[in-house]
Amino acid sequence: MPTLPLAIDIADTVASADPGLDTGAKADELLEAHPEANATREDVRETLEEELRSLDE
């Protein structure tokens, strides 16, 4: 399952995120680390933003 390592890194990123995280830059970094994942930059950026918003609820 090639997307599981990316999902784990997204969860780790959200758990340790500082306010003002540049989600676009972090998405680029995560995709570079996980070229096997079938995800776009926009997919990862949106997921990061959604998960970060969920922490505020």
Image (cartoon, rainbow, N blue to C red):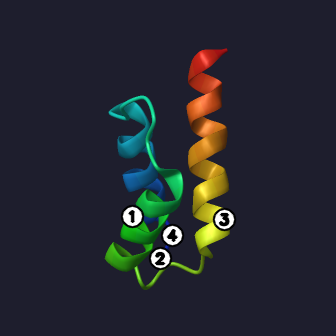
Nearest to the eye among marks 3 and 2: give it. 3
- Label 3 neighbourhood size at 10 Å, few (<14), some (14-19), many (20+)? few
Residue type at numbered disc 4? Thr
User: Dot 3 corresponds to which residue?
Assistant: 43
User: Dot 1 corresponds to which residue?
Assistant: 5
Question: For the residue labelled by badge 3, is the local secondary structure a helix, a strand or a loop?
Answer: helix
Q: Position of residue 19 (x, y in %)?
A: 43, 29
User: Dot 4 corresponds to which residue?
Assistant: 3
Q: Residue at x 56, y 33 (%)?
A: 52
Residue type at numbered disc 3? Asp
C-alpha separation, residue under disc 3 versus residue under disc 1: 15 Å
Question: For the residue labelled by badge 1, is the local secondary structure a helix, a strand or a loop?
Answer: helix
Contact check, label 1 and label 2, Cβ < 8 Å: yes
User: Dot 2 corresponds to which residue?
Assistant: 2
Q: In the rendered image, which quarter is residue 41 located in?
A: bottom right
Q: Residue at x 67, y 40 (%)?
A: 50
- Label 1 neighbourhood size at 10 Å, few (<14), some (14-19), many (20+)? some
Give the side of residue 1 with respect to residue 5, left or right: right
